[in-house]
């Protein structure tokens, strides 16, 4: 086989492999994002309501990790938000959520942000969940305040936090 034929055969094989393998952008590598409505292709992961796919694997890893936190604390957040849950109780997830909501935790908004994310996940509002994931990262990077984030998408949680600060009660106000 001459060099040209060898290169052509190798190129054809590479194109076949590339067509079958979407690289790092596979739903099985990011199952929580896939369950939240993200779609995967060779070009990246497209968020629900998104215009352009996410191509940075580090970003996808970070988003997947935040959804793992939501899953971990889901039962405790449901009980806080709606008073009941159909999720399996995770003792460590409950402790973590209680820690985020405790007065000793230095950042009062983190727990409420996760409650909003869980709410959108539970209600199947995946575009809002994707929006919250992006805003959570912006919040963690100090680009937006927690209060402003929640005022834009879950005002009732801001009101709940304010009431909780006023009277020290925990949980959803009736």
Image: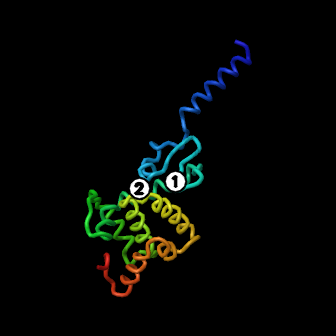
59 or 116: which is nearer to us?
Answer: 116
Residue picked out by circle 1: 47
Crowdedness of circle 2 by 10 Å Cα count: few (<14), some, many (20+)?
some
Look at 62% across and 29% down and name the residue there: 15
The mark closer to the camera, 2 or 1, is: 1
Look at 61% across and 24% down and name the residue there: 13
Residue picked out by circle 2: 68
Answer left or right for 92 relative to 35. left
Crowdedness of circle 1 by 10 Å Cα count: few (<14), some, many (20+)?
many
Relative vertical location of residue 159 with respect to residue 27 in this rendering, above or below: below
Q: In which quarter of the image is the N terminus?
A: top right
Q: Position of residue 104 (x, y in %)?
A: 39, 77
Q: What element carries label 1?
A: loop
Look at 31% across and 70% down and name the residue there: 80
Q: Is mark 2 on a helix, strand or loop?
A: helix
14 or 126: which is nearer to us?
Answer: 126
Determine the image quadrant of residue 42.
top right
Answer left or right for 42 relative to 81. right
Q: Where is residue 48 in the image (x, y as percent from the top left)?
A: 49, 54
Q: Where is residue 136 in the image (x, y as percent from the top left)?
A: 50, 65
Q: How far apart are marks 2 and 1 (CA)?
A: 17 Å
Circle nearer the N terminus (2, 1): 1
Answer left or right for 114 relative to 18. left
62 or 17: which is nearer to us?
Answer: 17
Q: Position of residue 14 (x, y in %)?
A: 62, 28
């Amino acid at each position: 086989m001459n060099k040209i034929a060898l290169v052509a055969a190798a190129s054809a094989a590479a194109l076949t492999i590339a067509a079958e393998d979407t690289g790092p952008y596979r739903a099985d590598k990011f199952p929580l994002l896939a369950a939240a409505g993200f779609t995967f292709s060779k070009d990246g992961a497209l968020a629900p309501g998104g215009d352009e796919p996410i191509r940075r694997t580090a970003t996808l890893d970070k988003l997947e990790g935040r959804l793992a936190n939501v899953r971990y604390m889901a039962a405790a957040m449901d009980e806080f938000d709606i008073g009941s849950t159909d999720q399996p109780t995770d003792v460590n997830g409950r402790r973590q959520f209680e820690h985020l909501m405790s007065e000793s935790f230095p950042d009062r908004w983190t727990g409420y942000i996760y409650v909003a994310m869980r709410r959108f996940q539970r209600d199947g509002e995946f575009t809002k969940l994707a929006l919250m994931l992006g805003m959570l990262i912006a919040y963690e990077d100090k680009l937006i305040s927690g209060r402003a984030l929640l005022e834009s998408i879950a005002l009732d949680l801001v009101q709940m936090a304010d009431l909780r600060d006023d009277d020290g009660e925990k949980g959803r106000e009736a």
